[in-house]
Amino acid sequence: MNYRNISNLNEGKDWKNTNKKYLEELQKFLDLADNIENEDLRKHIICQMLRCDKVLTEIAESIINKE
């Protein structure tokens, strides 16, 4: 699985797509996850991480919008 174009994962989340540190850490996670041999487990772990990321993004955006 190729994760090189990770900036398209969260369209509409420009602040995340331009944050170099966030993108580097996301890339590290995906690179590590790519080494999981069990495909079902790998997909499950990636999906769960993306769910967590979505929740954190919603929390961050609600805080940003309150300011």
Image: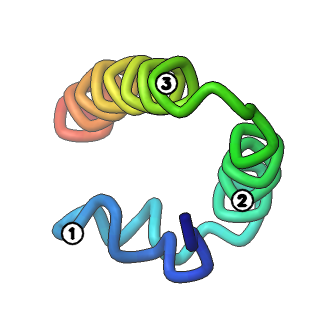
Q: Is residue 33 left or right of residue 5?
A: right
Q: Earlier in the sequence, mark 3 or mark 2?
A: 2
Residue 62 lies, in percent from the top left, at 20, 27
Amino acid beneath label 2:
Gln
User: What percent of the width, then of the height, locates residue 51?
Assistant: 32, 22
Q: Give the spatial CA distance, label 1 vs label 2.
A: 16 Å
> Cα distance, mark 3 to mark 2?
12 Å
**Mark 3 highlights which residue?**
49
Q: Is residue 36 left or right of residue 14?
A: right
Residue 25, above or below 21: above
Drawn side of residue 34 relative to residue 62, left or right = right
> In what element is the residue under mark 2?
helix
User: Residue drawn at (55%, 64%), measured in percent from left and top?
Assistant: 1
Residue 11 marker:
1
Nearest to the eye among marks 3 and 1: give it. 3
Q: Secondary structure at mark 3?
A: helix
In front here: 26 or 14?
26
Residue found 61% across the figure and 79% down from its top: 4
Q: Amino acid at mark 3?
A: Met
Residue type, numbered disc 1: Glu
Q: Nearer the viewer, residue 20 or 52?
A: 52
Which residue occupies 30% across, 31% down?
A: 54
Q: Earlier in the sequence, mark 1 or mark 2?
A: 1
Circle 3 packing at 10 Å, graded few (<14), some (14-19), many (20+), is some
Q: CA distance from mark 3 to mark 1?
A: 17 Å
Number of residues whose C-alpha sits closer than 10 Å to that of mark 1, classed few (under 14), some (14–19) or many (20 or more): few
Counting residues from the start of the chain, the first of labels 3 and 1 encountered is: 1
**Circles 3 and 1: CB atoms closer than 8 Å:** no
Whether residue 33 is situated above or below residue 14 in the rendered picture: above
Spot the residue most to the front. Answer: 38
What residue did someone put label 2 on? Answer: 27
